[in-house]
Image (tube, rainbow, N blue to C red):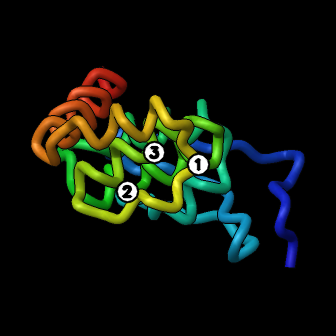
Amino acid sequence: MTTTRPSSGRTTYHDDGTVTVWDCIRGQWIRTAEPTPELLSTCSHEEADRIVRHTTIAVSDDVILAWAIVAGEHGDHLGSAIYLKAIDRDYSQVALDEDERRRVESLSIEECRALAEEHVRSSAG
């Protein structure tokens, strides 16, 4: 099984709102309209952003979770914690400094949800 993307391939963005993307976990190309958090975490931050923008219409908990994972994978720990709190998930293991932790704790779940939805929608447009 090949876990790295074939050098001849790249993600394809289809007119029907789906993408064909290399799945490093399964070692194969996947065509999907609903990329999983695991699939997105294997992409670069830029590619994951583009995939989510292309496939996202509604901002579901799964989409926000995907953004949390991608943010964490790419060093945006504050963003990751806000996304996790937005969907009422435990963010205590996210590596935050004292100021970042206070910032997240000062926000309500509803405020985190609004921030997460605004970011996802602005990235899609």
In this orientation, which residue lies closer to the viewer: 30 or 91?
91
Q: Residue at x 38, y 34 (%)?
A: 53
Q: Secondary structure at mark 2?
A: helix
Where is residue 1 shown, x and y percent of the image?
A: 86, 79
Amino acid type assigned to the residue bearing label 1 in the image: Ala
Relative to 99, residue 56 above or below: below
Residue most extreme to the left: 110
In this orientation, which residue lies closer to the viewer: 24 or 71?
71
Q: Give the mark toward the camera: 3 or 1.
A: 1
Relative to 7, residue 103 above or below: above
For label 2, the crowd category at 10 Å Cα-Cα, with few meaning under 14, some 14 to 19 and many 20 or more, is: many
For disc 3, the marked residue is: 80
Q: Give the mark toward the camera: 2 or 3.
A: 3
Q: CA distance from mark 3 to mark 1?
A: 10 Å
Amino acid type assigned to the residue bearing label 3 in the image: Ser
Quadrant in which the C terminus appears: top left
For disc 2, the marked residue is: 65
For disc 1, the marked residue is: 95
Q: Is residue 123 left or right of residue 97?
A: left
Q: Secondary structure at mark 3?
A: helix
Tell me which label, 3 or 1, sits earlier in the chain.
Answer: 3
Relative to 71, residue 92 above or below: below
